[in-house]
Image: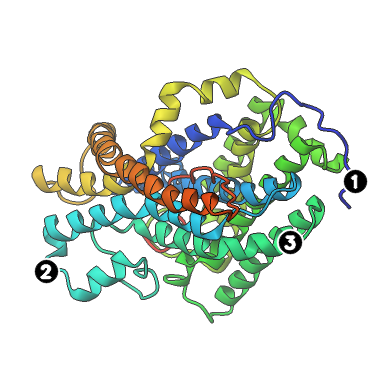
């Protein structure tokens, strides 16, 4: 049913860009850096609080849920407001401009500069340039092991238009849409069952998209609910999201409590040992709940002090360059250990983290302003020229800007964040 109750908190418009969400990228990226530094310095395995470092890969869940929310929202919004669907070609073009240039540069640098990768084979180049490095075991190279999550994101990007058309249908019915996109839970559950009976590999297939369909689907469901609330087409039950958003401290405290549970063995080992199917399932479920509790107060409800903090210019800037931090910080870690001649599992946690953040942000800044942003602007300008010609000749065009996706996430091996 699409019978609506007017949104209880109307202060934000349905067309608002939700700038506070930019800061979530920064939180996810910094968390993942901490996760990797904890492993590299062995603090994850050798300290009483190492479990918290091990589970900082929850940043992966934050990014995947945020991607589902941001990328599906234009389809839901256009359906709810009676506009034409976003153009698939434009959507894919924007994704390519956002992801490919800096990623290809990182692949080039890592495969050439790092001695562990030399000589890189033709297969190494093809796999990493085409995001197919996760479909065979043992193909992630030094400085690029985090790109498993980017390959998973790209798979989601490619199938999103089809899912969006099926979920939205010909008329806006938000409950139906939410139910359909929540089918991602069933996909992940089925995948976990196959892992449990041994038909799939815990070392390889835990990197593939079906493992994380529930995370992307949850983000899409939240996007549909958000649009329904802001357009007055939501059932009364959806109001709980705005109610939760009015208590951000409570939501985030609950997220921290769930995080504490993940630090126990229930969510699997801290090291690179692969989890059992049951442990993997527990981690996926807990991380999904944590990411959702973090996202709701930032995306839903009215204007709050918490949102103002998240929307601050400095926080948004960190979110803007977080994709570069994702791409370059593993290379920075490798270079620190090479230049300082450090053996693996040595070094101080805090000074290594500080060095990685400083140089990672430097690389990220150069990447964004020197590569990512100029090519996005250039590509957008070229894309607009034929559109203007089409308009001049009477061909209608629909230009719905898709929000920028969350910077993809990183983890060092073929499990959630390890």
Give the residue number, with chain letter if any, for mark 3: 180
Residue 38 visible in the snapshot: no
Q: Nearer the viewer, residue 173 or 200?
A: 173
Q: Nearer the viewer, residue 74 or 318?
A: 74
Camera-near label (1 vs 3) is 1
Q: Is residue 118 left or right of residue 187?
A: left
Q: How is the image coloured?
A: rainbow
Instruction: Examine the image and state in which quarter residue 374 appears.
Output: top left
Give the CA separation, mark 1 to mark 2: 62 Å
Quadrant position of the C terminus in the picture: bottom left
Q: Nearer the viewer, residue 361 or 270?
A: 361
Give the CA separation, mark 2 to mark 3: 47 Å
**Residue at 86% of width from left, 49% of height from top?**
2
Of the residues under marks 1 and 3, which one precedes in the sequence? 1
Tell me the crowding category of disc 1: few under 14, some 14 to 19, or many 20 or more residues within 10 angstroms, Cα based: few
Which mark is on residue 119? Answer: 2
Which SS class for mark 3? helix
Of the residues under marks 2 and 3, which one precedes in the sequence? 2
Q: Position of residue 277 (x, y in %)?
A: 55, 68
**Residue at 52% of width from left, 26% of height from top?**
310
Camera-near label (1 vs 2) is 1
Give the CA separation, mark 1 to mark 3: 18 Å
Give the residue number, with chain letter if any, for mark 1: 3
């Amino acid at each position: 049913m699409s019978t609506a109750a007017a949104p209880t908190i109307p202060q934000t418009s349905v067309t608002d860009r939700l700038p506070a969400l930019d800061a979530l990228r920064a939180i996810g990226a910094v968390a993942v850096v901490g996760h990797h530094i904890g492993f590299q310095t062995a603090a994850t395995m050798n300290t009483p609080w190492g479990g918290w470092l091990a589970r900082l890969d929850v940043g992966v869940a934050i990014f995947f849920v945020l991607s589902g929310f941001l990328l599906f929202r234009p389809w839901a919004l256009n359906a709810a407001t009676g506009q034409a669907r976003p153009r698939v070609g434009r959507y894919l073009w924007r994704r390519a401009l956002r992801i490919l240039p800096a990623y290809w540069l990182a692949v080039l640098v890592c495969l050439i500069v790092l001695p562990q990768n030399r000589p890189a084979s033709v297969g190494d180049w093809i796999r990493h340039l085409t995001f197919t490095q996760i479909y065979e075991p043992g193909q992630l190279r030094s400085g690029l092991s985090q790109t498993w999550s980017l390959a998973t994101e790209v798979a989601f990007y490619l199938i999103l238009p089809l899912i969006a058309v099926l979920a939205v249908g010909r008329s806006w019915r938000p409950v139906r849409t939410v139910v359909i996109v929540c089918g991602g839970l069933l996909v992940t559950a089925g995948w976990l069952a196959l892992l449990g009976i041994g038909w799939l590999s815990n070392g390889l297939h835990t990197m593939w998209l079906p493992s994380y369909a529930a995370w992307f689907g949850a983000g899409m469901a939240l996007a549909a609910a958000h649009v329904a609330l802001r357009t007055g087409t939501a059932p009364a039950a959806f109001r709980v999201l705005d109610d939760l958003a009015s208590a951000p401290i409570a939501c985030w405290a609950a997220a921290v409590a769930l995080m504490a549970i993940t630090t126990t063995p229930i969510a699997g080992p801290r090291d690179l040992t692969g989890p059992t199917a049951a442990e993997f399932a527990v981690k996926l479920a807990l991380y999904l709940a944590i990411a959702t509790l973090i996202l709701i107060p930032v995306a839903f409800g009215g204007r709050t002090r918490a949102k103002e903090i998240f929307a601050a210019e400095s926080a948004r800037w960190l979110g803007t360059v977080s994709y570069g931090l994702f791409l370059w910080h593993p290379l920075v870690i490798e270079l620190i250990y090479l230049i300082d001649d450090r053996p693996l599992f040595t070094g101080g946690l805090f000074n290594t983290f500080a060095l990685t953040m400083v140089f990672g942000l430097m690389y990220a800044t150069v990447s964004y302003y020197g590569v990512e942003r100029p090519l996005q602007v250039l590509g957008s300008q070229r894309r607009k020229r034929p559109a203007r010609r089409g308009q001049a000749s009477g061909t209608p065009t629909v230009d719905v800007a898709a929000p920028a996706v969350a910077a993809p996430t990183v983890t060092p091996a073929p499990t959630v964040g390890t």
